[in-house]
Image (tube, helix red, strand yellow):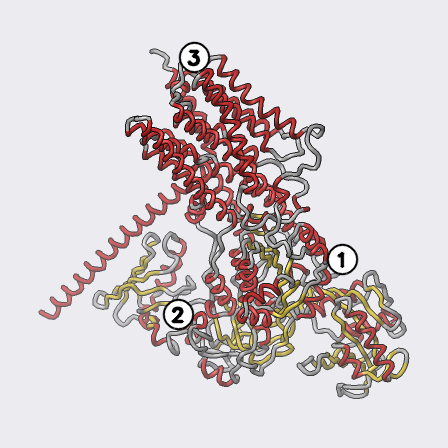
Amino acid sequence: MRFHFTSFAIGVGVGVAAVVVGRHLRPAFVEVATAAYGLSDAVAARIAMVQEDVEDMLAEAKARSRNAAGMAA
Amino acid sequence: MERLSLAATSAAARVERHARRSRRLRLAVPGLRGSPALAARVEAELSDPELGVEEVRADARSGRVLVRYVPEAPLLQRLEPARDAAPGRRRPGRRGRRGSQRPEACWHALALDEVLERLETSRQGLQPEVAAARLSAWGPNAVDGVGPRSRLELLVSQIGNVPAMLLLGSAGLAASLRDFLDAGAIAAAVGLDVGIGYRIERQNEKLVASWRALEAGEARVIRAGRIQKVAATTLVPGDVVVIRAGDTVPADARVLAPHRLGCNEAVLTGESEPRAKRVAPVDEDALLAERTSMVYAGTTVTAGRARCVVTGIGPDTEAARIRELIEAEESPQTPFERRFERLGTQLSLAGAASGAAAAGIGLLRLRSPRQVVGNAVALAVAAIPEGLPVVSTSALLRSMQHLRERGVVVRRLVSAETLGGVSVVCADKTGTITLNDMKLEVLDVGRGVLEAEGLRIEPEKLFQDPRALILAAAVLNCDVTVEGERGGLSISGSPTEKALVRAADAAGFDRDALREAFPRRVLRERSDRAQYVISLHDAPDGGRLAFVKGAPEQVVELCDRDHEGPIDAAARSRLAERNHAVAAEGLRVLAVGWRRVDGDEVPTRGFTLLGLLGLRDPLRPGAAHTIQSAARAGIRTVILTGDQTRSAEAAARAVGLHGEVLEGRELAALLEADGREALARLRHVAAVSRVTPAQKAAIVRGLREAGEIVAMAGDGVNDAPAIKAADVGIAIGRQASDVSREAADILLAQEDMRSIVDAIGEGRAVQDNLRRAVRFLLATNLSEVALTLGAAAVGAREPLNPIRLLWLNLLSDSLPAIALATEPADGDLLRRPPAPPDAPLIDPAEHGRLLRDGALITAGAGFAHLLFGPAASFSALTGAQLGYTFTCRAPGKPPDEAFMRLVGGSAALHVAAVALPPMRSLFRLSPGLSPIELGAFGVGFLVPWAFARAAHDPVIVRRGRPDRHASVTRSHPDDPIQEEDTP
C-alpha cells in the first residue's frame, strides 16, 4: 500500500483535534444527549397516553354494550 | 373541571376523563411523570377500600392515574368542582394586575370585621375542609420562581450576540460561495466559543443554585379552633396564622391580635428598623412601610407574637408584586453590544465598498463575470475580521475567570466588559453599605462620651456605677429572646435591643442573673405618640423599680432630675447639647432613666435620667474605602434606601458622600413633573431615602437616560427591579434574596463591596485590551484589503486568495489578537475616569494611525510581491502582521510568557503551513519552500518589532507619551468627581 501523506495528515489532524476540541465539546454533547433523553421520554409518554386513551375508549364501549344488553334483556 | 386533592402531593390532581358508565377516572397528577416513587405513593393512597376503589394504576411515563371504582364509591365525594369550592374562583386579591383595575380591597385600610367578612372567615380560622377546598381552587401559596436559566437559554445567549452572529454571517457567506472548507472552519470557531462560554456560564448557574435558600417552611395555623403546623405552601386566604419572634411571615396577612409585634421589613422596604404592628387600620394611601396593620410574606418577626388573617398568598403577595416589576423591567443593551453592533455595521459597509471597488476594477479590466463576483466576495470576506468574536470571547472569558477567583460570579459574559464603563454605582444602604446589625458605640452618663467598646463593669456595684446601671436598665427594659451560650448567642428582637444585650454581655453582665434579680412585672410598649418603653420590675430589696428607654426629647420630659440635680431650663439645654453631640456623629440616640416605685402602677413621670446611649448600624468593612476608591476612579456612588432620611444621610456622610439627600417621593414627583430638572439634581445627589422598589428602578433608568452607565448593588427583594434596570446588576452576598440574584448580572460571593471596585478594574482591563486587539485586527485586515485591491488595480497577480485570507484572519491574526486581548491589567486602571459610554471601540483620533500602520504593512508586502511574487508577499504580510502585535501592546511592560507563546505559536503555524506540501497546495502556492519566503517572513516580522521595541524603550521613547486609552474623557466634563468631595 502506498503512503498517502494527505490522508495521513488528515488522520493525525482529526485525532489531535478530537483530543483538543473534545473537552470543549463535552457540554454540547451533554446538551444533545439530554435533548435525546427528553425526546425519548416525550415519545414514551405520548405512546403511553395513546394506549391509555384507547383502553379508556374500549372500556367505555364495553360498558355501553353491556349496559345496552342488560336493558334489552 | 374537577380536581382531587391528594396527600401524596401538594398540587391537586386534575380529572382528565371521568367515564361514569365504565366507572373509570383518569387523573393527571402534577409531578408524576418520571417519578415512580410518587406513582407508588399515589397508588398506596388511593388503594383504600374505604374509598370504594377497585383498581389504581399510576403510570410514571404518562403522568396519569387510572382509578376504577365501585358504584356509589365514597371517592366521588372527594372530587371537587373548583367553581363551588370557595367564595368565588378569583383569589381575593388586593388589587388588579399592575394597577390596571381599581383596587378590590385595601386590606390595610379596612376595619377588621370587614376584612373577616370579605375573606369569609372568623377569628377562629377556617375549617379544614374549607381550607382544602380553597387550596384546591386557588392553588398553593408559592410564587413561580424565575428559576435558573435553562440550558437552551444559556446556549442561545452564547450564539445570540453580535460577535458570534458576525462570524456565522461570514460562514454563511463562505458557504454561499460553495467554499465549505472555509465555512466549516468558521463554524468550528463559533462552536468552540459557544462551548467554552456555555460551560463557564453553566458552572456559574450551578454555583448560584447552590446558594438558593430553601424557601418552603412551616406555618402555625388555627384550623377547627386548634393550632396546627402545616406546610406554608398550603395556606389559603382566610387562614388565621400564629407568628412569633424569629418567624418568617408565610403570607401577606392582616394583624388580628398582636402582642408587642415587631417586624423587620427591610427585605421589602429597605428600612432597617423594625416596625411595630397594630390592629388599627391605616390610611388607604399609606406606603408599604407605613402599613402597620399588615404583615408581609418574606419579612421576619423581630419581637412579640400575633394572630393574623391571611389576605394574600403566592402571586397576590407584595413580594410577588415586586417580581412583577422585575418582569416588566427589561435588561438594557450593554455598551459592549452597542459598540460591536456599530463596528459590525461599519465593517459590513467597508466590506461592501471593497467588494464594489474590486468588482469595478475587474469590470474595467474586462474579466469574466464569475471572476469579478468571486473577487468581490473574497474581498468582502477579507474586510471582516473573522477572528474578532474568538478574540472578544477569549478576553471576556479570561476576565470572568479572574473575577471568579476573587469571588465575583459573572452570569452574563458581556457584563464583564460593561463593568469597565460604569460611571455611577447605586447601592442599597441596609445590608450593602451597612451591616444591618446595630452596635452600641458610645454612652454618656454625664461625664463625657465614653466608648462602649472595651467597657468593663462590676455587676455587684450596679447602683454605685452609673455605666453599669444604664446598661442594666437598658437590657432589663428590652424584650428579646436569647438562646445559646456566650459566644454562640442567637438573639431575636429589634436590632437596637439586640445591640444593647450584646453590649451588656460584653461588659460583663450575667443576663440571666440580672433578670432573676429584677423580674419584670409590666412592659409598656412604645406607641406613635410615646416613643419610649417603660418597664416595671421587682427589686432585690423588695421594692419596685421602673426603667424608661426611648427618644431623648421625650424621655427627658419624663425625668425631673439627673446625676447633677433637678432638671431645670439650663439643664435641659445642656442635655439637648449632649444629645446633639452624639447624634451629630450619625448615631441613633436613646435616653435611659429610672426611678423607685411604690405599688403596681406604671409611672409616667418623676424619673431620674441615667444618660444617653449612641448606637450605629456599622458600615461594612471596606465600604467607605470602596466608595472613595470608586470616586478616585471617576465613579459616583448614590445610596438608595427605604430607610429614613436621617439614617440615609448619616450613612452617606460616614462613607464620605457629601451631596444632597432627597426623599424618594420628592424625586419621583420631580421625575414625573420635569425629567430634566430631576436628572440635573440626580447629578448632585448622595442618597435617596424612603425610596420604593419602583422608584429605585426609575432612578436607575433616569441616570441611564442622563448618559451614565449604572451599576446597581443590592441584596433585598426591594432592590431587584433596579438591579434588572441597571446596565450591570450586582447581587451582594450569599444571603442576597433569590429574587435579586435572579435579576443580577453579577453576584458577589462575599458581602464585601470592595469586590465591586476590583470588578470594575477588571472590566476596564477588558476594555483596554479589546481596544488594542481591535486596533490590531483592523490594521491587519486593512493591509489585506489594500494589498488585494492594489494588486487588482495594477493588474498584478493575485497575492491573496480567499483561503490565504481566511488562514490569516482565523489563525495567523487571531492568536496574536488573543494575546493582546488577554494581557495583564495596567496598574493605573482605577486612577482614571471611565471611558464615555458612547466611546467607539477605536478612538477617532486613532483612525489616522490605523491607516498609516495598515499602509506600512501593505507597502512591505507589496514590495515583496513586486520583487519575488505572491508566495513571498504572503509570508512578508504574515510576518509584518505578527511583528505589528508588539506595536499594539500596552506600553511600559515587557511581554509576558503567555503573550510570547501565542505570537510564537502563530509564527510556527505559518512556517509549518508554507513548509508542508499539502498546505502549499491548499494555499495554491508553487511546490517547494523557497528561502526567499522565509527571509520575507523574517524581515516582515523584524521591522515592526524593532519599531515597537524602540517605541517602548524608555531611553528612546519620548517622555510623557501616555497610552491613548488613558486619555479618554468623561462624557460630561462638568460632572463633579467625588474625590473632591470626600474628606
Q: Earlier in the sequence, mark 1 or mark 2?
A: 2
Q: Chain of mark 2?
A: B
Instruction: Choose top left, top right, bottom left or bottom right for residue B132.
Output: bottom left
Residue displayed at 74% across by 58% down: B487
Q: Is residue B519 above or below residue B810?
A: below
Could you say where residue A13 lies in the image, as x and y percent from the top left?
Answer: 43, 24
Residue B136 is labelled as 2
Q: Looking at numbered disc 3 in the image, what kind of residue is underneath it?
A: Gly
In this view of the protein, which residue sits in the foreground, B278 or B873?
Answer: B873
**Crowd class of label 1 (few under 14; some 14 to 19; many from 20; radius 10 Å):** few
Residue of label 1:
B983
Residue displayed at 62% across by 35% down: B890
Could you say where residue B453 lies in the image, as x and y percent from the top left?
Answer: 81, 61
Between the residue at mark 1 and the residue at mark 2, the CA separation in whole angstroms equals: 61 Å
Residue of label 3:
B928
Could you say where residue B287 lies in the image, as x and y percent from the top left?
Answer: 56, 75
